[in-house]
Amino acid sequence: MTRSARTHSLTREEIVEAALRLLRRDGLSKLTMRAVASEMGVTPMAVYHYIDSKEDLLRLAYAEISAPWGQAPLLLAGQDWEDSLRSFLMSIWEGLAQYPGLGAYLIELPNINVTPQGLALGIRFFEDAGFPPVQARLAWSFALTYIHGRISVDAHLGHKPEAPRLEGLRAHDYVTFGVEGVILGLRAIQEGADVVLTTRTRRSRG
Amino acid sequence: MTRSARTHSLTREEIVEAALRLLRRDGLSKLTMRAVASEMGVTPMAVYHYIDSKEDLLRLAYAEISAPWGQAPLLLAGQDWEDSLRSFLMSIWEGLAQYPGLGAYLIELPNINVTPQGLALGIRFFEDAGFPPVQARLAWSFALTYIHGRISVDAHLGHKPEAPRLEGLRAHDYVTFGVEGVILGLRAIQEGADVVLTTRTRRSRG
DNA sequence: ACCTGAACACCGTTCAAGT
DNA sequence: ACCTGAACACCGTTCAAGT
């Protein structure tokens, strides 16, 4: 894929695409700025004319990857919230599974998946599903935290999520069970199960 | 803490203690082999006479940290499984919160928290709680995955889990809500909620 | 056996210079 | 504006040498 002769100048989009290609092929641990540059047939430092840093590049890469589920409305017509949440979480998992190590890196970054739009969308989704505002916020965080945790755990399994593991269980079974657990837990909370927080959130002491 | 004059030779234990001290103080991102050596008043390469690699050191550090919850039986007398699981997960969260970045690193390592003993203990715990074997395995993974995900997400919040965030919610509220969600989800599954896996696990086709 | 000093093979990134 | 070449300030780790 290395271009021996470039016919035009670089673009941000080309750089992000090159990074995504390398990420799919070799995973984050092999992705260096030097590798991205060499994939484009250019000197390492050329890349810095278009991006600020490696973190910047990986944020752009994630923006590209997450476009399918970042834009679409969460609550589809004719679906209940449980089905919507299930397919949403599974599509994140399937999407990030193609980019080994990326999810585990992103989970540590501040403000990933809590962009203003993303956050508002998620809270709105759970409010529409009948959760009060604070619980909607917590429910959204709970669901995202689980799926990103699962993706991080899967990171060390390499590129083949189909490889069988203990008792014949595969990665897909673990994530299916976990997503179902999250949904059932949230259903119980929505139906009135008590969750006692230490912080008083809605009460103004009078 | 740097010793200007050493009176005896290094030990593995001293090295691990130095690493834990630095981890508590500055987090994993500042922990280099050179920093550990300098904390002990010794040349960087001296450490390699006692440990194989940085990964080795961090595994030893985690073994030390996890001793309190790694040894103790999960199911305490007179407690039901939900209370036991809650205090188990919270103690992992509280324990790792003191070592910023460590949990997020460990989540990617193979075979962390799935040592043969740890795995057997966890599966046994859920079997005693009434889960069939395969579900016990999945339940154990689900609970650990969530709490490690939560710890990873918390990593970027810095050393102060008490700092207030959106809507006055604090880190403790997020983990409390999530742990309760996990427990309620598992309760629903234990009480018979269906989780359809793609893999046939117990059936030998006849 | 225990530790040092120098070096290797990398990183991300800065800076001055070329066109 | 776009890119190069050299260098800086780090890493983890290897290796030969000292005591």
Image: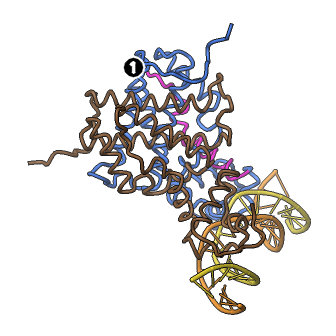
Chain colours: A brown, B blue, C orange, D yellow
Q: At which x and y percent is residue B28?
A: 56, 56
Q: At which x and y percent is residue B139?
A: 50, 26
Q: At which x and y percent is residue B17?
A: 59, 51
Predominant SS along the magenta part = helix
The image quadrant of residue B5 is bottom right
Tell me the residue at 69%/68% (across/down).
A37
Q: Nearer the viewer, residue A175 or A19?
A: A19
Which quarter of the rendering shows the N terminus of chain A?
bottom right
User: From which residue to which does the magenta span run?
Assistant: B53-76
Q: Is residue A38 left or right of residue B155?
A: right
Q: Is residue B4 left or right of residue B193?
A: right
Would residue A181 be seen by someone viewing this image from the given angle?
Answer: yes
Residue that label 1 marks: B80
Q: Residues within 10 Å of mark 1 (few under 14, many from 20)?
A: few
**Residue B131 drawn in magenta:** no
Against A173, residue B190 (above or below) is above
Tell me the residue at 34%/52% (across/down).
B162
